[in-house]
Image (cartoon, rainbow, N blue to C red):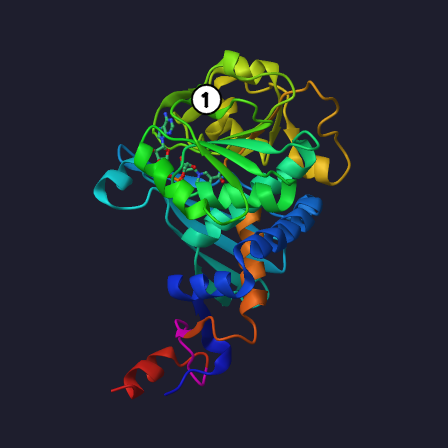
Amino acid sequence: MQPSDKALVPFVSVDNMMRLVHHIGVEKMIIELAAVIEADFKRWESFDKTPRIPAHSPHGVIELMPTSDGEAYGFKYVNGHPKNTSEGLQTVTAFGLLADVYTGYPTLLTEMTILTALRTAATSALVGSYLAPTNAKTMAMIGNGAQSEFQCLAFKAMCGIDTVRLYDIDPNATVKCAANLSGKGLSVISCKTPEDAIEGAQIITTCTADKKYATILTDNMVGPGVHINAIGGDCPGKTELHKDILLRSDIFVEYPEQTRIEGEIQALDDDYPVTEMWQVMAGQSKGRTDDRQITLFDSVGFAIEDFSALRYVKQAIDGTEFFEPLDMLADPDDPRDLFGMVMRAV
Ligand code: NAD
């Protein structure tokens, strides 16, 4: 028995996601994703929100990230295992699903490892477009792993940077990142220390992976007027910045209830004031107000960004060949005759 079209779920494999990225172009896709994320942040109050649901182990964390706007429902499965790279595996992998709230039927299943890198970069640069100093031209990129090239290209495409200064404790990661960024329209400078990397940078992105309270930046490394895009501290017991930097910064977050558990601000009191980025985008709160202010985006990654990305992909694959129809929903002719359908399949 052939499943009807309504029971076939479009599935975007890693291979098809890569074809989609090439079809659209990395920077164009980041810009388009950022537009969808911004539109969804502006209607923040129409979403169900909850901190993501983690399963911690000594090896890393596995998380579920659900949300819904009442019409569509989405979730992402994502892991964070910093020790994986030493075993030839990735720190972060993900897949996600979109569903129709009216029927409860899934409408998209997709790889989200590549999509997470794109949506994280899109969110970072979108936030940077509100908070980074105007005319910022140089970004320090500390942590040159899987996310790093996406971050650099997002800030080039959306915030107008023309120079990146790379640093990683593993020089091979910096060599890889510099090679991947060659010919992409950025001046790329490989640095031997984090102090060298931040020299002259108006934007500092930290995107390292270590399951501990790390100190990637100390207080004396951060001068007035800088925007810090802190990506890597996204789990209890896993942060990147010295607490004194937080106390000198104006802190901007996605969803405080989740960031207070997972972000840099886990080092601060539960009522320490932070600004929600959706309020800045909706014009309800101020972003950067002066040239000497240190702005800090304490990014942990929130479910609405993935929901935006899922909806973007669903629309982007429409009418293309970048997906396969997946037979993942039982579809008996008589909806109550599931057993009969199984028996007739002999
Ligand atoms: P990755 O393992 O591919 O890269 C991490 C890099 O950090 C490695 O090259 C490693 O050598 C480097 N590093 C570790 N400690 C360092 C230090 N002290 N100084 C300089 N470099 C150091 O991981 P990835 O996929 O690029 O992810 C990076 C981090 O970003 C992870 O912690 C991940 O959980 C987080 N992340 C956050 C979001 C978000 O939305 N905020 C999204 C995706 C990933």
Q: Is residue 52 visible?
A: yes
Ligand 1, seen in the image, is in the quarter at: top left
What is the magenta segment's predominant secondary structure? loop
- Residue 152 is covered by the magenta coloring: no
Looking at the image, which is closer to me, 36 or 61? 36
Q: Residue at x 36, y 42 (%)?
A: 176
**Residue type beneath disc 1:** Asp
Which x, y percent locates residue 50?
Answer: 54, 41
In this view, the residue farthest toward the right is: 283
Which x, y percent locates residue 191?
Answer: 42, 28
Q: Is residue 302 visible?
A: no
Which residue was labeled with disc 1? 196
Report if the beta carbon of the residue with label 1 is closer than 8 angstroms to ligand 1.
no
Looking at the image, which is closer to me, 35 or 8? 35
Q: Up-down: is 58 above or below 343?
A: above
Q: Is disc 1 placed on a helix, strand or loop?
A: helix
Quarter containing the N terminus: bottom left
Q: Up-down: is 291 above or below 256?
A: above
Q: Which residues are magenta?
A: 326-334
Quarter containing the C terminus: bottom left
